[in-house]
Image (cartoon, rainbow, N blue to C red):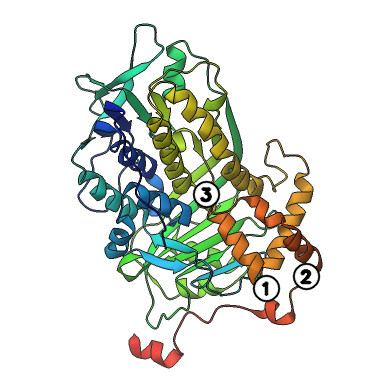
Amino acid sequence: MSTATPLPSTSAGRHAIVYGGSTAGLSAAGVLSRHFERVTLVERDRFENAPHPRKGAPQASHVHGLLTRGMNVLCEVFPGFQEDLKAAGSIFMDMTGDFAWCMGGLWRPRIQSGIYFYSQSRLLLEWVLRQRLHALPNVRVLDGREVTGFLTSADKARVTGVQLQAPGGGQEESLEAELVVDASGRGSRTPQWLEALGYPRVEETHIHVDVVYASRLFRAPPGFSADWKMMNIAPEFPRERQGAVIQQIENGHLLVSIAGWLGTQPPLDDAGYVEFTRSLSQPHIHEVLEHAEPLGPINVFRFSHNQRRHYERMPRFPEGLAPVGDAFCSFNPIYGQGMTTGALQAQALGGCVRQGLGGLSQRYRQQVGQLLAVPWSMATSGDLRFPEVEGKRPPAFGLTSWYGDRFQQLASHDEEALRTFVRVMHMLESPAALFSPRLILKTLTSRPTAADLERKPEPPFAPAAAREQAA
């Protein structure tokens, strides 16, 4: 569970603006509420007082999880958030005890790791965060407003606020602040607006992966009695190009996401969707979907490329401006790092604000540049396994990929290796932990037994007679 302690407070300024109501934006607004007299969160969409879909979050219908490091940060920002989320229906699961996880054709041991994963819809997660934010007396939420540009000082050396209008047009208004935070996502217009102000174009790195996700909500079939709360059948890179995740979420429903890389397209018709899961390396998800009842449409999300904007490299950058979340860096969602990394950026922003507003933008950009190095490497190293994916491979990429495959084989039967991998995955330890002398020796010498190779989850249904009776 979370071991977070509340963030300290300081008095840094009168007003801060965050535009973009994503997890990163909500986190940043919560952090800044401890340091500014007033915080305004601006969002283009209208927020509903319920976990309803919104246009600005098209990925919200897909499987999402929150890593332990991310939960710890959110509990620092919003003490009691974890309890609120659980009360709203989130399912807390041990990352290895409750998670049936197949990688490279091998099932991981089902042991208690003490590392927790928080399973809920993205809609529920952000709704609970918004409720927390609404409860803060010095935070105003201004939805149904679109940021159309920056206000600046006469010499354009400082951003002093934003220009707003209703989406689609209408009278423009100005909103001044000592700090403006861009949480508007990967489509952020900050690069173009900075260029228009005379700043150099920010350097960007793209790793194209062409991933297509298709997700659907289901009612669990009669007799469904799984010994897992979530199951992931991951592809073996680079040989396989499709995978699937199924998770139990609030209201007793099942949320399924199927995905294909580099031209492997998940079917979007009812029969094809279920049939796609037959082609996976393991049959379990297919067995569930053959009997499950769809509760809505198939939602599609296309992710063309990992994108990193190197704001930390810009020789000139205005004071009073800080991009967070996908506006700074966005990852292939399959690796589950986006929300946690956005929360870590909000945490870093708070630390920079506590040092004072002078030089804030420079300190923040440099810190986030360093912060992003590890999650960016972890996310892109998998995608770069495909030979047709263009991008600079780091030194010894072939050797580290080979070691990674061998380590995953070790984690299929060695509890120490599995626990270490999970801690790295949840950003609680550095990837260097995978290369300790003890684990290197195990990785090079240990092999799975016949029993390890035969391990698999229990069938996801009660006996046939019980299923027939329930029907």
Left or right: 49 as drawn, with respect to 413: left
How far separated are the C-alphas under marks 1 and 2? 9 Å
Picture residue at 25% right of the left edge, 45% below the top: 133
Residue 413, disc: 1
Residue at the far right in the pictured view: 445
Picture residue at 44% right of the left edge, 47% below the top: 339
- Asked if the residue under mark 2 is in contact with the one under mark 1, i.e. CB atoms within 8 Å, the reply is yes
Residue count near mark 1 (Cα–Cα under 10 Å), binned few <14, some 14–19, many ≥20: many
Quarter of the picture containing the C terminus is: bottom left
Amino acid type at image mark 2: Ser
For mark 1, give the secondary structure: loop
Sequence-wise first label, 1 or 2 = 1
Residue at the far top in the pictured view: 154
Residue count near mark 2 (Cα–Cα under 10 Å), binned few <14, some 14–19, many ≥20: some
Residue count near mark 3 (Cα–Cα under 10 Å), binned few <14, some 14–19, many ≥20: many
Q: Position of residue 86 (x, y in %)?
A: 32, 64
Picture residue at 31% right of the left edge, 28% below the top: 12
Residue 212, disc: 3
Amino acid type at image mark 1: His
Picture residue at 42% right of the left edge, 44% below the top: 343
Compared with 172, 303 (above or below) is below
For mark 2, give the secondary structure: loop
Residue 249, disc: none
Amino acid type at image mark 3: Val
Residue 215, quarter of picture = bottom left
Disc 2: which residue: 446
Sequence-wise first label, 3 or 1 = 3
